[in-house]
Image (cartoon, helix red, strand yellow):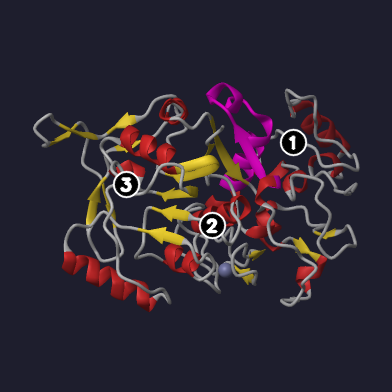
Amino acid sequence: MAMRFRCTAATTRNSGARATRRKRMPVAENGARCCRGSEPRMCWSIRPKSRCWQAFWPPTATPCRCGTGRWKHGRRRLDRLATARCCNVVRGDNDDSDWPPLRMNQALLRFDDLAARKDDPALFARWLFSGSLAERPHGLDGMQFRCSLCMAVTRMARREGVEDLREGMPCATCGMSARLRSCLAMLGTLVEPSDRIYITEQGTPAFAWLQARYPHVRGSEFEPDADRRAALAAYLESLGGHGPIEFQDVTRLDMADDSLHAVACFDVLEHVPDYRAALREFARVLRAGGHLLATFPFTDGPDTVVRASLSPQGEVVHHMEPEYHGDPVGGAVLCFQHFGWDVLAAVREAGLAHAEMVMPWSPEHGLLYGNWMLLARKTG
Ligand SMILES: [Zn+2]
């Protein structure tokens, strides 16, 4: 559906300034330029106050969910962007069943390798948009979005500092961060409720959420200590989940070959020194057509950064300042690596032939730049 928008740079009252600004505005590689067209285009000005931000919101010609085809954002200044909204959401209609859930497979930027990602105009535009929004004081304050998990229309609350677009941006209703909202919504597009799913965590909100919806989901923790597993079980119960916590080593899973429809591994692989063995295990237990969905610290650079490794004697060798990540019961877990694009080759070598890095993009669902995830499928 065609969507009207007004270009900030091209509609300044001063014709001289207008001419200058338009001349300075470079043309994107794909030929799109800032203009007065009726379709959204990419605008490449890097000056926030003259940026044609409406071209980014929404970045595709997605029709307004209320069916009128209009978005209520005739505002020009970037600092008002956070309040741009669909005319339907303005009414605050939480019971709008016509607004479908996020169809994640239609909101993805997908890349097979670093070469495909480099200089991608769509990715660059989203980075510009998200960065300027997050870094402005209170830039996300009051931003309204539809949670892709609990389906509530919610608002971003004011938070101190620059908002973390991955671990932050929690839904005011279910509390899930942008990363979890994107990951669980993505998983939901890959599996059926009756499918067998394994997730490499158990005492977490993500597992409790899955357990309530997928009867055959199985989770585990890499926690040999029985007391700490009991603490995790109590935590899981407080989240609405149930059951004892299972111990698994992801490099030696006890599951049968070709037995699972999906494996989900959210921010765990960076804690596994031999992550290639874990990838081989995931490939082994997945059935043909099964999916691996994984997130991890991603550098967006060509090579994986090894921060620490294990010596042949099994001792930890630090190559950089040690980095520890928290766990739900207050532990600190050493991070062995930050992954780069070469992780795709490792996944393919492990037996998952179809592998790509994807990034969901859906501002109307509160998903901005940076939620990289690995998506792989086992073929034949
Ligand atoms: Zn929610």
Residue 372 visible from this viewpoint: no
Residue 275's x, y, as percent? 32, 36
Residue 26's x, y, as percent? 73, 26
Disc 3: which residue: 253
Amino acid marked by disc 1: Cys
Pair 1/2: label in front: 2
Graded by Cα atoms within 10 Å as few (under 14), some (14 to 19) or many (20 or more), the crowding at tag 3 reads some
- At mark 1, the secondary structure is loop
Q: Is residue 214 above or below residue 289?
A: below
Q: CA distance from mark 1 to mark 3?
A: 49 Å
Amino acid marked by disc 3: Leu
Q: Earlier in the sequence, mark 2 or mark 3?
A: 2
Q: Earlier in the sequence, mark 1 or mark 3?
A: 1
**Mark seen at residue 184:** 2
Residue 19's x, y, as percent? 84, 31
The count of marks equals 3
The residue that appears at 68% across and 35% down in the rendered structure is 122
**Mark seen at residue 43:** 1
The residue that appears at 42% across and 54% down in the rendered structure is 199
Seen from the viewer's position, the closer of residues 334 and 6 is 334
Seen from the viewer's position, the closer of residues 55 and 267 is 267
- At mark 3, the secondary structure is loop
Q: Which residues are magenta?
A: 106-131
Q: Tell me whether circle 2 and circle 3 mark residues in contact (CB < 8 Å).
A: no
Q: CA distance from mark 2 to mark 3?
A: 22 Å
Q: Is mark 1 within 8 Å of ligand 1?
A: no
